[in-house]
Image: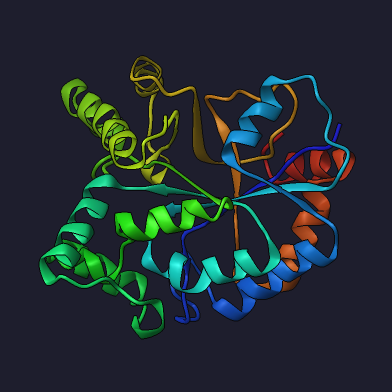
Amino acid sequence: MSPIPVFMYHHVSPHKGDMVSVTPDVFEAQMRFLKEAGYRTLSADEVVGYILSDVEIKEKTVALTFDDGYLDNYVHAFPVLKEYNIKATIFIVTDWVEEASNIVRSQESGVRSNETPTPSHREGKELIATSQADKVILNWDRIREMEGSGLVEFYSHTMSHKKCAELSDEELIRELEGSKKVMEQKLNKPRPYLCWPKGSYTPESVKAAKDAGYTALFTTKRGVVKKGSDRFCIERIVVKDRVRWFKNKARIYTNPLFSKIYLALRGRG
């Protein structure tokens, strides 16, 4: 019974050493390794299905997730995913996407990837804070294009990326229900999965998410998916901007014995 590591990315950006970023060359090498080494990649839907089913997966298998919905995911990651036929899941902040889409519409022009610089994480935060989300965040047109490839799925990262553990009951319900509703209206398909912004949640947050209709929840806790894993606490592995690190972790985390020992040593059994 092989475990499945769910790798967590944010940016794929040329800003080497930037917070939560993997450079495009490193990302390409990581994806090439998965392809050449015979790894299977799962969508979030398939990860949840694996947890719930009795079907065993014999191949070496991983899943890739991206948090926040940055434009550089389209510019730098999407072409590589298409080249190697690799699946991924992106969790988006719907208020940011709405703002980015509204700005693009008001300018009556889309964003072409080959003309779009990708800001650093710090610059991106400043752009979002100053109502320039179109320069750093995916818009609905890009999201539809990516999902139309059959390789990328999109799910909720709440409406405004606030720490859910710190919200009032009313604010939490708005964040959870609002993002789900907007995504389902814009993309015409159920969106039953949520990823907690900044890994912030409480038992009450989990109950609210279930009540809002979410059937699986992704966290920032370190660990792997196994048969019997809690689908309301899906653990992930933060990716580093290193190829050798990625290769080693893919090999370790997909091995039942090595994965158990390594996570125990790291304090995650």
Q: Is residue 161 above or below residue 113?
A: above
> Which quarter of the figure has residue 37?
bottom right
User: Is the N terminus in the top left, top right, bottom left or bottom right quadrant?
Assistant: top right
Q: Measured along the vertical axis of the image, is residue 184 above or below residue 37?
A: above
Residue drawn at 49 percent across, 22 percent down: 215
Where is residue 88 drawn, in percent x and y?
58, 52
Near-viewer residue (187 or 100): 187
Kindly tell me whether residue 69 is visible in this rendering: no
- Asked which colour scheme the image uses, the reply is rainbow
Percent x, y for residue 20? 47, 64
Q: Is residue 191 visible?
A: yes
Nearest the camera: 109 or 163? 109
- Residue 57 at x, y = what percent? 83, 35
Query: How far across and down, in percent of the image, does residue 117 sit?
Result: 35, 82
- Numbered circles on residues, count: 0
Quadrant location of the C terminus in the rendered image: top right
Please identify the quarter of the rendering in which residue 102 is found: bottom left
Q: Going 82% across and 51% down the picture, which residue do you hit?
A: 252
Against 219, residue 123 (above or below) is below
Image point (73%, 41%), residue name: 4
